[in-house]
């Protein structure tokens, strides 16, 4: 949480995270280069750079895309999500080295502009096997550039969280383009079953994780609920919610988080104002609902971030009939004080 | 502290022992994944050719200039044995711009003796020379008595292979063939480099054919759709000492739907 913008709000965990990113990237590049020079020494330095950074970027992208759904399935992985932004920017840098070196190698020093050359030097757009795969990589790199360039809370705030989120969901378009770029490009020539098999497993893993995580959410979202005579919706019994934790309940396609704490119940909108994290998967810490993604906090009674912070989410009214929790489906405006229900 | 147990908050330094243990295990697994993938991707690369491009080294070559129909320097490597060194320009261009500049000053260069300082490219018995500057071409005063009609007809052939740009194929890039390199090869040939058909037989022996049109004139833009993919070509083959020249009708080239087998 921050009041003003700094390039990076460093803390201990971000530093460790970034050191590990750097160490893993260097380890990959050194192992790739070392083995290539040992067993396939006739390579050129340009080809080595293009291949080492290209494959590194693809692997990093798979790890990045796996972190989201795997953290939803097992919250122990949430520390990997905390600084995923830096992992994304690092992945873009690796992809950019691959892209820029490829452009220099294959498209500069000719009789046309290099960017024009990417789109026109192979015109077999109607063929699948001969498709100009470099175009796919170029478009993916442009998307990754805009994502990396806006990977900062300044842009999150100024673009608005919904626009920012839509822009960053473009990572899936970039991923699809990159998979096609590799399968219609490198894999048309470098046909090792190990690399093709490895990337195929990676693709299936990413799709499966997203489907499983999505299926779990659909189950929550489509759960039917009974109404009482005042049209309030039955949520669950109080014993079904752990202390300081929440139950996520869907009302008119909006998810609501019902928290139990200190013998009380409060309900707020489930979506964190920072990056859309699921507040209902968070925990009450120091009296505040704490987002599991980046630790943004809200007071359970009014959905407001504690001063001096200014984020606010919608609140909901609850009532208790014996130990059955009922929710008024009408949301209050963001930051509205609602008296907690004693349980 | 207790209430934070097993709930990770990035900006709080303390981490529960369970989270710490889990993260250590995860980092170890990720390290193994990184090492494994680096090994798989590196060791799965196809072998690179032992071709050479002397980028940082310039060599002076003297020989008799001829254009058959692409610029070449005929060099006597030992008594009565000649090698034709294919001349190429800087970047993705042919040598014509440098040759034409000298020709404009000195008149025709055909059958004249030149000394050229440039970067050698060589592979599998073929040598090429990259010229980077017209100032590095010197016209020697003596006239050559070398014969001018070097080509002899071998016959009509139907050959399967791949059309490449010779500069990249013979040393500048690895691999300098196939789909990955296709865009570059198209730029090189569009820029004035000769298209070369490479064939490789079942014994892994390669032959190289400089491609011309039926009249023996250079072809560039017409052949671009066929570059970097296995193709079948028909034409008359001539032997030009250590090179072959193949006269073809570009419209008769047949693209083959199979993997590249050259090198």
Image (tube, coloured by chain):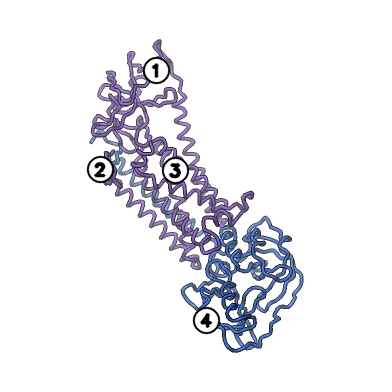
Q: In which quadrant of the rendered image does the N terminus of chain A lie?
A: top left
Query: Does residue A222 appear left or right of residue A247 in this picture?
Result: right
**At 37% across and 44% down in the image, what residue appears?**
A151
Tag 3 subunit: A
Neighbour tally class for label 3: few under 14, some 14-19, many 20 plus, Cα within 10 Å: many
Dot 3 and dot 2 residues touching (CB under 8 Å): no
Q: CA distance from mark 2 to mark 1?
A: 39 Å
Residue B192 sits in quarter:
bottom right
Chain B: colour as depicted:
blue
Nearer to me, B22 or A253: A253
- Residue annotated with mark 2: B13
Q: Secondary structure at mark 3?
A: helix
Neighbour tally class for label 4: few under 14, some 14-19, many 20 plus, Cα within 10 Å: few
Q: Is residue A343 visible?
A: no
Dot 3 and dot 1 residues touching (CB under 8 Å): no
Q: Which is closer to the viewer, label 1 or label 4?
A: 4
- Residue annotated with mark 3: A65
**At 32% across and 52% down in the image, what residue appears?**
A19
x and y percent of residue A161 in the render?
Answer: 38, 36
Query: Does residue A178 appear left or right of residue B218 in this picture?
Result: left
**At 33% across and 20% down in the image, what residue appears?**
A238
Q: Secondary structure at mark 2?
A: loop
x and y percent of residue A291 in the render?
Answer: 32, 34
- A271 to A48, vertically: above or below: above
Q: Are marks 3 and 2 on the same chain?
A: no
Tag 1 subunit: A
Tag 4 subunit: B
- A275 to A40, vertically: above or below: above
Dot 1 and dot 4 residues touching (CB under 8 Å): no
- Residue annotated with mark 4: B60
Tag 2 subunit: B
């Amino acid at each position: 949480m921050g009041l003003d913008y700094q390039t990076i709000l460093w803390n201990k965990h971000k530093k460790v995270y970034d050191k590990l990113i750097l160490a893993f990237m260097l380890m990959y590049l050194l192992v790739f280069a070392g083995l290539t020079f040992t067993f396939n020494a006739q390579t050129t330095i340009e080809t080595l750079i293009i291949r080492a950074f290209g494959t590194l970027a693809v692997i990093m992208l798979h790890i990045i895309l796996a972190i989201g759904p795997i953290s939803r399935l097992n919250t122990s992985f949430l520390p990997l999500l905390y600084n995923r932004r830096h992992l994304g920017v690092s992945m873009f840098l690796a992809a950019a080295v691959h892209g820029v070196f490829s452009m220099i190698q294959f498209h500069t020093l000719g009789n046309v502009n290099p960017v024009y050359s990417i789109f026109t030097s192979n015109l077999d757009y109607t063929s699948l096997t001969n498709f100009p795969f470099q175009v796919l990589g170029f478009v993916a790199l442009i998307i990754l550039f805009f994502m990396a360039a806006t990977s900062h809370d300044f842009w999150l705030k100024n673009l608005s969280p919904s626009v920012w989120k839509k822009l960053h969901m473009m990572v899936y378009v970039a991923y699809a383009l990159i998979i096609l770029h590799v399968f219609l490009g490198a894999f048309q020539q470098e046909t090792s079953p190990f690399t093709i098999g490895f990337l195929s497993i990676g693709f299936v893993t990413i799709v499966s994780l997203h489907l499983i995580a999505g299926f779990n959410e659909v189950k929550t979202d489509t759960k039917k609920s009974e109404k009482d005579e005042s049209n309030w919706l039955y949520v669950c019994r109080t014993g079904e919610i752990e202390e300081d934790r929440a139950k996520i309940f869907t009302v008119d396609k909006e998810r609501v988080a019902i928290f139990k704490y200190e013998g009380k119940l409060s309900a707020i909108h489930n979506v964190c104002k920072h990056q859309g994290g699921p507040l209902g998967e968070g925990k009450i810490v120091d009296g505040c609902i704490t987002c599991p993604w980046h630790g943004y906090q809200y007071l359970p009674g009014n959905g407001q971030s504690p001063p001096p912070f200014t984020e606010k989410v919608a609140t909901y009214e609850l009532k208790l009939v014996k130990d059955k929790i009922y929710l008024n489906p009408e949301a209050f405006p963001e930051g509205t004080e609602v008296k907690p229900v004693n349980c | 502290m207790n209430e934070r147990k097993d709930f990770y908050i990035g900006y709080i330094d303390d981490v529960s022992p369970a989270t710490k243990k889990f993260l250590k295990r995860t980092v170890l697994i990720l390290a193994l994944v990184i090492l494994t993938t680096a090994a798989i991707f590196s060791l799965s690369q196809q072998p690179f050719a032992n071709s050479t491009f002397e980028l940082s080294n310039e060599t002076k070559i003297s020989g008799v200039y001829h254009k058959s129909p692409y610029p070449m320097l005929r060099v006597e490597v030992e008594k009565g044995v000649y090698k034709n060194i294919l001349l190429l320009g800087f970047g993705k261009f042919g040598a014509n711009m440098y040759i034409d500049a000298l020709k404009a000053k000195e008149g025709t260069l055909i059958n004249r003796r030149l000394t050229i300082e440039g970067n050698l490219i060589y592979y599998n018995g073929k040598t090429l020379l990259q010229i980077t500057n017209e100032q590095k071409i010197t016209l020697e005063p003596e006239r050559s008595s070398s014969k001018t009609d070097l080509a002899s007809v071998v016959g009509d052939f139907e050959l399967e292979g791949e059309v490449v740009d010779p500069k990249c194929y013979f040393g500048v890039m690895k691999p300098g063939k196939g789909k990955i390199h296709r865009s570059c090869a198209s730029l090189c040939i569009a820029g004035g480099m000769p298209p070369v058909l490479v064939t490789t037989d079942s014994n892994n022996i390669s032959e190289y054919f400089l491609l011309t049109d039926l009249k023996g004139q250079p072809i560039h833009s017409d052949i671009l759709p066929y570059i970097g993919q296995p193709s079948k070509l028909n034409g008359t083959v001539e032997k030009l000492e250590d090179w072959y020249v193949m006269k073809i009708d570009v419209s008769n080239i047949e693209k083959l739907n199979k993997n590249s087998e050259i090198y």
